[in-house]
Image (cartoon, rainbow, N blue to C red):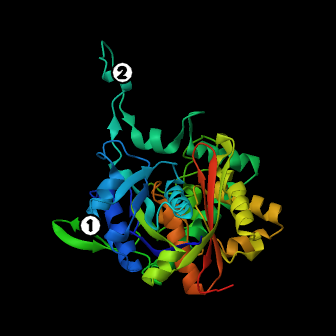
Amino acid sequence: MKVYIVGAKRTPIGSFMGSLKNKSVSELGSVAIQAALESAKVTGHQVDEVIMGHVLSAGQGQGPARQASLGAGLPDSVVAHSVNMVCGSGMKAMINGYAQIQAGLAKIIVAGGMESMSQAPYLLPKETRSGLKMGERSLIDSLIVDGLTDSHYHYHMGLTAEQLAEEFVISREEQDNYAFHSQQKAIAAVDDKAFVREIAPVRVSVRGKEEWFSEDEYPNRKTSLEKLARLRPAFKNDGNVTAGNASGINDGASAVVLASDSVVEQEQLTPLVEIIGIGQSGVNPLRMGLGPVKAIESALAMAKLSLSDIDYLEINEAFSSQSIAVLRELSAQHAVSEESLLEKTNIKGGAIALGHPIGASGSRILVTLIHILREKNAKYGVASLCIGGGMGIAMVVKNTEFSD
């Protein structure tokens, strides 16, 4: 059975405590779900299930995915659940939906991801519930603990990026250069309105007035190589990873509509891409940034393709050092030049410039990739992410405008 994506939309990405700070994660999810369904010309009554990636769930209320589903106008009869695979959550949600359709358990599934990092709460220590006898206690930042710190080694994700920078001998200059070019690509894409087809605007309140928020706001137009070079290391005194060559802390949501080949034909839906390969990997948590390498290899094997067959890639930019290390490994293992890979990877900028709302990024990069394939009349695309805790996830899609 073939599984198609018939709708793909995302919200604009908001900066930390920026334009989307007052929107709950479920509200953001609702916008993406509703827009994806509308673009697919699918009604809520046709949907079997909603699956949404989501990481920072503390304080967000019971069943955020269910909240998002109902908020998007889907009927009570449509079930919904969340998936937490850290940065890979949005893609894992889509893979789970794909698997359900493949197994004949569903015909149409909405899958994606959502995150409000701005609304991640501070927590009291666990022993507070049983009673504190004496002494001071500190608040716990759920954003850092649940989203950005490896629970096994108690390493911040930034330290894993430092690890790869040392292992692959990636200089500060190389990292800043990579980050600067990501910013330049993203700014050019925003200015060229290259994201318009994939973005669903969000209604926000600005100084008491309702406005439409419709453009990614994280790209930094004021940055330069000189400014990047002046930034201090963020995670290690003698390190090279800075706020400028790392991904952002952001808010946003994205969603796709998955459909079986039979329902596409029966309902005369317009498929955008076919999912032809999926892959996952586990690596040492301290080298988590390399997760995409093996995941991409597995996804390509399932699709019976080589890396040289791929027209465009979206590989999530957790950090410059991580992105460079992945490209180097892919280049070495698949006998493809690093330069040619770089030319077709994240052509509209990546998470360093656009932002990384962790639960949403897995589906966000696929939404962007789908629109790139359609716009460029390109056949094959790969989307992949590294995942905190030492994992990787990937998906290969084929543009349905190509019949063979």
The amino acid sitting under disc 1 is: Gly
Q: Quadrant of the N terminus?
A: bottom right
Instruction: Establish if 239 lies above or below 177.
Output: above
Q: Quadrant of residue 239?
A: top right
Question: At which x and y percent is residue 320?
Answer: 62, 58
Q: Residue at x 48, y 58 (%)?
A: 356
> Is residue 283 something that shows in the picture?
yes
> Is residue 21 something that shows in the picture?
no
**Mark 1 crowdedness (10 Å alpha carbons): few <14, some 14-19, many ≥20:** some
Q: How many marks?
A: 2
- Numbered disc 1: secondary structure: loop
Q: Residue at x 39, y 73 (%)?
A: 36
Residue 40 left/right relative to 342: left
Question: At which x and y percent is residue 16?
Answer: 38, 56
Front residue of this view, candidates 383 and 137: 383
Instruction: Establish if 360 lies above or below 162.
Output: below
- Cα distance in 3D space between marks 1 and 2: 40 Å
Which residue is labeled 2 in the image?
127
Front residue of this view, candidates 195 and 367: 367
Question: At which x and y percent is residue 37?
Answer: 37, 73
Q: Residue at x 58, y 74 (%)?
A: 274
Which residue is labeled 1 in the image?
73
